[in-house]
Image (cartoon, rainbow, N blue to C red):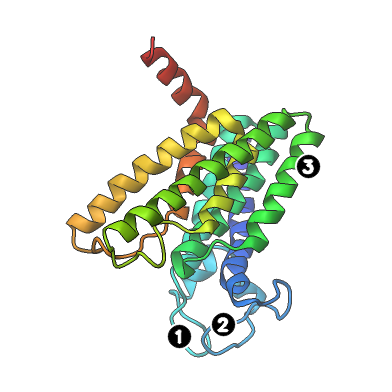
Amino acid sequence: MIILTYLLIFIIGAMLGSFFNVCIYRLPRGEGLLFPGSHCPVCNTPIKPWENIPILSYILLRGKCSQCKGKISGRYILVEFICGLLYLGLYLRFGLGVDFFYFLFFVSVLVIITFTDLEHFLILDKVTYPSMIIGLIACYLTKKDLINSILGLLVGAGIIYLIVIISAIILKMINHPCKDEGGMGLGDVKLAGVMGVFLGWKFVLVAMFSSCLFGSIVGMALILSGLKKRTDYIPFGPYLAIGSLVTVLWGEKILDWYVQLLG
């Protein structure tokens, strides 16, 4: 029974991941989420129901359209698989309670934002603003600390906004090639606000630290491996998402460890 429960949670996550793929593809293009129906991005042929089974259909079709044989992005199966794992992780962490559904929405938003930022270098207002509002409403309805969420929003967005201003000044001072674009975008500021709403002001700080740590490690690895140059733009949204996920799952342990480290 436990294994069946795990499998069911994973399948639900993969199914929702399939819908998130639609969001990732269509939202930056200004297209509707429900109409038209699912279709091949290459030849626009409508996708049959049995070709739209999460993970399995991609494997059976070998990542190609059944009609035009055009290549389908590996992002589709990746998002579905990741969502299945994330939902299972949340279930193992919180059980089937209020916190599970509360953070399930948050993590789902992070998945959409992460892959939209990776593909289009965009963090959309139509995703971040509604997420802030829904988060605050959910906080109130679940009788969580609403003041903590509001402070989290201000702290999270405020820290990233300060970094945006400082990085823009530094880039102009050193005449960096990216001086006109700035070190970070306002989309990151709004994402940090969403993080603060769901995590609260203490844990959004943990998420920020984790994000900077992951971003530094991966950024240096990409530069040293030659995959990226120092002047290349690397989206920070995915690292904010990773830091948030780490905080959702292990934030209390990280914070306790840090407090103990301080004595």
For residue 137, the mark is 3
In the rendered structure, are the residues bearing label 1 and label 3 in contact, judged by CB atoms less than 8 Å apart?
no
Residue 138 % position (x, y): 76, 40
Query: What label does residue 40 carry, if any?
Result: 2
The numbered mark, 2 or 1, whose residue comes first in the sequence reads 2
- Quarter holding the C terminus is top left
Horizontal side of residue 240 vs 107, given as left or right: left
Label pair 2/1, CB-CB below 8 angstroms: yes
Q: Secondary structure at mark 3?
A: helix
Viewer-side label of 3, 2: 3
Residue at 69 percent across and 39 percent down: it is 102
Instruction: In the displayed orientation, state which residue is furthest to the front.
Output: 173
**Amino acid at the residue labelled 1:** Gly
In this rendering, would 225 be left or right of 82? left
Label 2: state its secondary structure: loop
Q: Secondary structure at mark 1?
A: loop
Tell me how far mark 1 sits from mark 3, CA to CA. Answer: 43 Å
Percent across and percent down for residue 75 are: 46, 66
Label 1 vs 3, first from the N-terminus: 1
- Considering only vertical position in the picture, is 34 above or below 175? below
Give me the residue at 48% from left, 59% from top.
Answer: 185
Q: Kindly indicate the quadrant of the structure image that contains residue 157.
A: top right
Q: Quadrant of residue 196?
A: top right
Q: CA distance from mark 2 to mark 1?
A: 8 Å
- The residue indicated by pointer 1 is 70
Considering depth in this image, is 26 or 52 the residue closer to the camera? 26
Which kind of residue does numbered mark 3 sit on? Answer: Ile
Q: Nearer the viewer, mark 1 or mark 3?
A: 3
Q: Are marks 3 and 2 in contact (CB under 8 Å)?
A: no
